[in-house]
Image (tube, grey):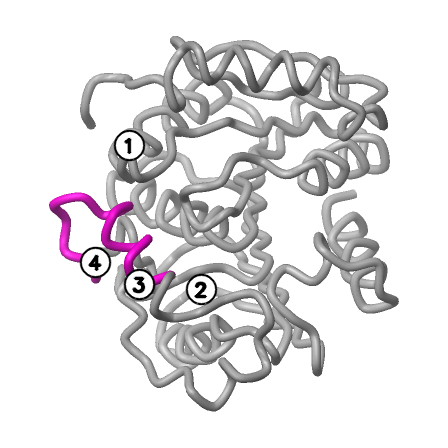
């Protein structure tokens, strides 16, 4: 892995932490801390525990963590009595997957003697699965479980999304494809480190995926379901009809509440 590189840059990182501390958008925060892995911030929710949840936020690898992500992290920590860590990993277009892997792997190794769980949404879901495949390939201790919300499993977007794109109010395959290229840097966009759909799916931790049917990434999730059948990995796919991309985070629907309650139940 390459030398550690900062999240965005020092000025931007410090500016974001000031916003987190002072903005009305984050006034709901009651109890959180932060620390650094080298010069990368990690948000910490809940008290120290032998059970650690690493939450990898989405945002197409170009957007910083949302207030909605932080609300979810705080809720999970409070209701599971587990510590939740949300790394603010380096983002495209300034950085690539290499920088994010370097940062998150250092965080993972810091707590490798704990029970670690991965949760990721959208791009963060793809990153979580890619990291698990890397850890498996390199014979490291793997996380206990993966919970993925609308994961982005193939940044090459090698599929026909026309049947769903008209019903997806959030994502477009054209825009995502360009973001995927930026995130991949010089790497083939079908390399498992950026597109875990194409990786070794054998002997991974148990995986739970939540997806709505009005999400273009749903088609790649269905492809993943078919591929993983022939591998020694347990997958539970929970589908909500008519729901959109990362619906548990961006909506206040009954389906969203049901999904979040189910995630918390699995982690208790």
Mark 1 lies on residue: 94
Residue 119 vertical position relative to residue 165 in the rendered view, above or below: above
Closer to the observer: label 3 or label 2?
3
Which numbered disc, 4 or 3, marks the residue that appears first in the sequence? 3
Mark 2 lies on residue: 233
Question: Is residue 180 covered in magenta?
Answer: yes
Residue appearing at x 32%, y 45% in the figure:
136
Closer to the observer: label 4 or label 1?
1
Q: Is residue 224 left or right of residue 114?
A: left
Residue appearing at x 69%, y 62% in the figure:
247
Badge 3 density bin: few <14, some 14–19, many ≥20, Cα 10 Å: some
Q: Tell whether label 1 touches label 4 (CB within 8 Å).
A: no
Q: Residue 76 or 200: which is nearer the viewer?
A: 76
What's the CA distance linking mark 1 and mark 2?
35 Å
How many numbered circles does the render carry? Answer: 4
Mark 3 lies on residue: 177
């Amino acid at each position: 892995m390459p030398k550690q590189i900062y999240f965005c840059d020092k000025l931007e990182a410090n500016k974001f932490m000031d916003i987190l501390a002072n903005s009305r958008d984050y006034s709901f925060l009651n109890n959180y801390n932060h620390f650094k892995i080298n010069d990368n911030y990690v948000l910490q929710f809940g008290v120290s525990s032998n059970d650690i949840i690493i939450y990898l936020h989405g945002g197409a690898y170009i957007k910083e963590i949302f207030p909605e992500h932080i609300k979810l992290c705080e809720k999970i920590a409070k209701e599971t009595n587990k510590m939740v860590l949300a790394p603010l990993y380096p983002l495209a277009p300034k950085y690539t997957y290499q920088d994010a892997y370097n940062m998150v792997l250092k965080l993972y190794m810091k707590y490798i003697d704990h029970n670690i769980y991965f949760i990721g949404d959208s791009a963060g879901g793809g990153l979580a699965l890619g990291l698990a495949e890397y850890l498996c390939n390199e014979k490291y201790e793997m996380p206990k479980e993966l919970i993925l919300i609308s994961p982005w499993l193939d940044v090459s977007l090698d599929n026909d999304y026309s049947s769903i794109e008209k019903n997806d109010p959030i994502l477009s395959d054209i825009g995502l494809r360009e973001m995927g290229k930026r995130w991949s840097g010089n790497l083939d966009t079908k390399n498992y480190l950026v597109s875990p759909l194409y990786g070794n799916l054998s002997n991974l931790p148990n995986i739970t995926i939540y997806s709505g049917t009005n999400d273009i990434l749903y088609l790649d999730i269905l492809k993943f379901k078919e591929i993983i059948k022939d591998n020694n990995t347990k997958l539970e796919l929970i589908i909500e009809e008519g729901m959109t991309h990362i619906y548990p985070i961006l909506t206040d629907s009954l389906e969203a509440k049901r999904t979040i309650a189910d995630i918390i139940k699995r982690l208790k």
